[in-house]
Image (cartoon, rainbow, N blue to C red):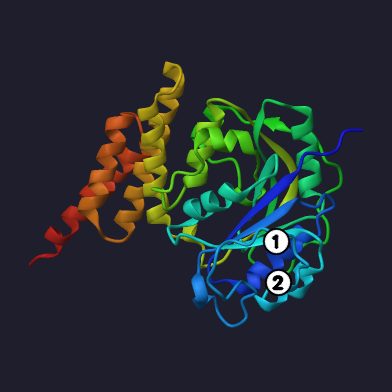
């Protein structure tokens, strides 16, 4: 039987040492050990005294763990004894997309897996995904199912059985981001061909990359939940206003690049209209009626029959008349 493809893991982190320790432990517990783990410290020395990251400035270290310099530089002893090559580099400080790209420059595995510092993997995650990449040469991006919970506890095991992968079409990806970033494994050649993540997007840069990949490569999901996705108030995606705005930016860029066929372009315009309408509802809820009205009108320009936009414009009209009725 042929050897499984080699895997590099890229793990950006920003001032969350407790979460990071759990994330790295889940990587080192994989039944298919990765070739290397690249931790991109995007938080700098302010990560805190409990941080296991390098405290000293200097170039990236790419040697396997276990060398005598590792402990001196502050890496967790459990990481050192794992036998996996752990590399820690300073991030550029320009957000998760730039941090992942910095890690990608050092990745040497045939496959690259991404993990956020606040998430964790189940032990068979890399093994099951690598098996599918070995079978399907055209597969560029493969996500998995996930378990999301706000509680600190974690289920002991995911449901049994690896299951079969499900293709994710470009149309399905336009409608919604179907892939959790911490679940994704990608062929390194695919990522390099696409130029990595778009660093100009502070949010939704992962969705942008999956959309670009789907135009040239096979994108799929293994439904088995192999990732524990932690929800908490510090997540960048918890800012719904910013998230809706950046979703719109991703869709505008997809339309500007050109989508094959009138149907796909129509799907993208309707999805963009939905983003504008949802943003309008958020603005109306904050009392920013003029801004809300602008967003609803943008939605109407894209999709004249949008019920969400029509309802939003009526809401704005009622809100604009309310102060006039209140005057004596």
Q: Is residue 287 above or below residue 178?
A: below
- The answer to which quarter of the image holds residue 192 is top right
Residue in the picture at 64% in, 69% down: 19
Provide the secondary structure element on which disc 2 rests.
helix
Residue at the right extreme of this rendering: 1
Q: Is residue 146 above or below residue 263?
A: below
Residues packed near mark 2 inside 10 Å, few (<14), some (14 to 19) or many (20 plus): many
Mark nearer the viewer, 1 or 2:
2
The image shows residue 128 at horizontal and vertical percentages of 80, 42
Q: Is residue 96 visible?
A: yes
Report the label total: 2
Q: Answer with mark 1 or mark 2, whichever residue precedes in sequence.
A: 2
Q: Are marks 1 and 2 in contact (CB under 8 Å)?
A: yes
The quarter of the rendered structure image containing the N terminus is top right
| Horizontal side, residue 147 vs residue 12: left or right | right
| Horizontal side, residue 166 vs residue 280: left or right | right
Q: Which mark is drawn over residue 86? A: 1
Per the model, the C-alpha gap separating discs 1 and 2 is 9 Å
Q: Please give the residue where the numbered disc 2 appears in the rendered image.
A: 70
| Horizontal side, residue 123 vs residue 183: left or right | right
């Amino acid at each position: 039987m042929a050897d499984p493809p080699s895997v590099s893991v890229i793990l950006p982190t920003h001032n969350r040492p407790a979460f990071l320790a759990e994330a790295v432990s889940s990587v080192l517990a994989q039944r298919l050990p990765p070739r290397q783990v690249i931790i991109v410290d995007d938080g700098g020395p302010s990560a805190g005294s409990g941080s296991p990251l390098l405290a000293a400035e200097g170039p990236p270290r790419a040697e396997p763990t276990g060398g005598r310099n590792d402990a001196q530089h502050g890496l967790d002893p459990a990481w050192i004894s794992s036998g996996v090559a752990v590399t820690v580099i300073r991030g550029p400080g320009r957000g998760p997309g730039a941090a992942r790209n910095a890690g990608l420059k050092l990745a040497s595995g045939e496959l690259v897996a991404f993990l956020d510092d606040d998430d964790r993997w189940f032990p068979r995650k890399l093994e099951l995904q690598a098996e599918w990449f070995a079978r399907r040469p055209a597969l560029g991006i493969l996500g998995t199912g996930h378990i999301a919970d706000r509680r600190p506890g974690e289920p002991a095991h995911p449901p049994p059985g690896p299951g079969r992968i499900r293709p994710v079409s470009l149309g399905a990806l336009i409608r919604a981001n179907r892939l959790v970033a911490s679940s994704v494994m990608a062929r390194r050649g695919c990522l390099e061909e696409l130029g990595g993540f778009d660093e100009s997007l502070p949010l939704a840069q992962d969705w942008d990359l999956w959309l670009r990949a789907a135009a040239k490569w096979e994108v799929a999901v293994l439904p088995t939940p192999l990732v524990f996705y932690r929800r908490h108030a510090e997540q960048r995606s918890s800012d719904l206003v910013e998230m809706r705005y950046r979703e719109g930016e991703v869709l505008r860029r997809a339309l500007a690049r050109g989508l094959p066929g009138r149907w796909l372009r129509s799907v993208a315009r309707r999805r963009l209209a939905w983003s504008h309408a949802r943003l309008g509802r958020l603005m109306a809820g904050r009392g920013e009626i003029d801004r809300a009205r602008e967003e609803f009108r943008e939605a109407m320009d894209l999709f004249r029959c949008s019920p969400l936009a029509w309802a939003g414009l009526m809401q704005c009209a009622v809100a604009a008349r309310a102060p006039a009725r209140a005057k004596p």
